[in-house]
Amino acid sequence: MAKSRREISFGLAVVLSLTAAALVRTGHGADAAFARASGTRFTIGGRPFYSNGFNAYWLMYMASDPADRSKATAALDEAARLGATLVRTWAFSDGGYRALQVSPGVYDEEVFRGLDYVISEAKKRGIHLILSLVNNWDGYGGKKQYVQWARTQGHSLNSDDDFFTDSVTKGFYKNHAVLTRVNKMTGVAYKDEPAIFAWELMNEPRCQSDLSGKTLQAWITEMASYVKSVDPNHMVEIGLEGFYGESTPDRKRQFNPGGYTVGTDFISNNLIPGVDFATIHSYPDQWVPGASDGAQVAFMRRWMASHAGDAAAVLRKPLLVAEFGWSARSNGYTVSMRDAYFRMVYEAIYASARAGGPLAGGLFWQVMVPGMESWTDGYDVVLDRSPSTAAVVGQECSRMTGLN
């Protein structure tokens, strides 16, 4: 069914944010406890914060349509039931069907209200959110859409990677009004909302046109600083998968699958002052295809151990396993195999956290709910239909929050 659309501009969003600032000064958020990075651990209100949770990138999309909103509610209810305290989701949808950002700086109010709903409902359940600001991939627009918008305005860009260097696309990114949005359900600007754990600059940034890493290093430096200038309350992370780069050639050869490089640098990128904590993603079935199950598990162990060591000794920042999963499309897949893999990942995270190490939480990819069968990517977990997996996840939630 066609939606009525009330378009709002970035300028209006900024004006609205001033109202939120006034609310904060009068007590709506003045004493709120925002998440912080303190050495290699997270804290909230001065107390340690160890977490466990999942990805559900689709929450805003579903919440923006009254007919589908119950799906977002169900996912958050599952999180609360299991004791999950951290969920990662998209705060972008650029161009295309049910877009948040219809064109640069112009927004669909109904979709924005979907994100308002997700934040409001997560807060009610004691769940914190990592909100990603743009996609490296084409899904939901991504850098490709930003480049297309610039071309439509008459600018000459040669590739999608020009997103990282072109002044027009960088301006579009900075004008994305999510940080200054005032939540219509809570009356609090996103930048003043403690339920938001952190902003993610980009989902899985890659720049294949410059494998030296200089392009992404410059973009991350600029955008982390910019986000902090608009919102000094919240942490910033990059959205990295964890590939090593030119600053550590030995580690690149030793740990990157097949010596693979994507223009990122786990060490130098995360040493940027505006970046508060590091992330890794891992999909051994995609990165070391054809390897045995045992070899893929061994890869994951090494991937976590190497990055945890670097987070502790070099970065001195917390590390979050922000995406991991086991695909139902893998050869010989069984639910028990997935459960065993999840246990292995969780054991490594918990052991590090318990010993005061940098691993501070894990977010599996991904939760879906009944009625989303057409959305499956193989990694999805419908928790109320997978009781054994839900039990594994719930146990880790209990152990991690027990460290707080």
Image: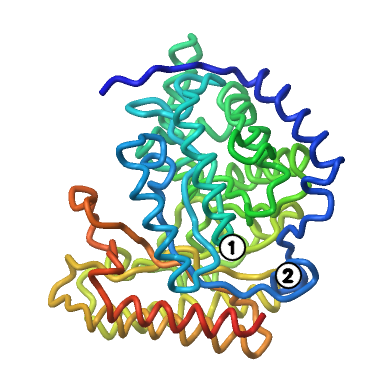
Q: Determine which quarter of the picture holds residue 404.
A: bottom right
In the image, 331 versus 29, the foreground residue is: 29
- Position of residue 285 relative to residue 66, above or below, is below
How far apart marks 2 and 1 lie (CA) works out to: 15 Å
Q: Amino acid at mark 2?
A: Thr
Q: Is residue 243 visible?
A: no
Q: Determine which quarter of the picture holds residue 191.
A: top right
Q: Is residue 295 visible?
A: yes
Q: Which residue is mark 2?
A: 43
Q: Amino acid at mark 1?
A: Gly
If you read the primary sequence from the N terminus, does the residue marked by circle 2 or circle 1 appear first?
2
Which of labels 2 and 1 is toward the front?
Answer: 1
Residue 25 at x, y percent in the picture: 86, 40
In the image, 320 versus 65, the foreground residue is: 65
Q: Badge 2, how many Cα within 10 Å: few under 14, some, many 20+?
A: some
What quarter of the picture does the N terminus occupy?
A: top left
What colour scheme governs how the chains and residues are painted in the rendered image of this protein? rainbow
Query: What residue is drawn where x is 49% and y is 10%?
Result: 153
Q: Badge 1, how many Cα within 10 Å: few under 14, some, many 20+?
A: some
Secondary structure beneath disc 2?
strand
In the image, 284 versus 364, the foreground residue is: 364
Query: What residue is drawn where x is 28% and y is 61%?
Result: 380
The label number, if any, that marks residue 126 in the structure image: 1
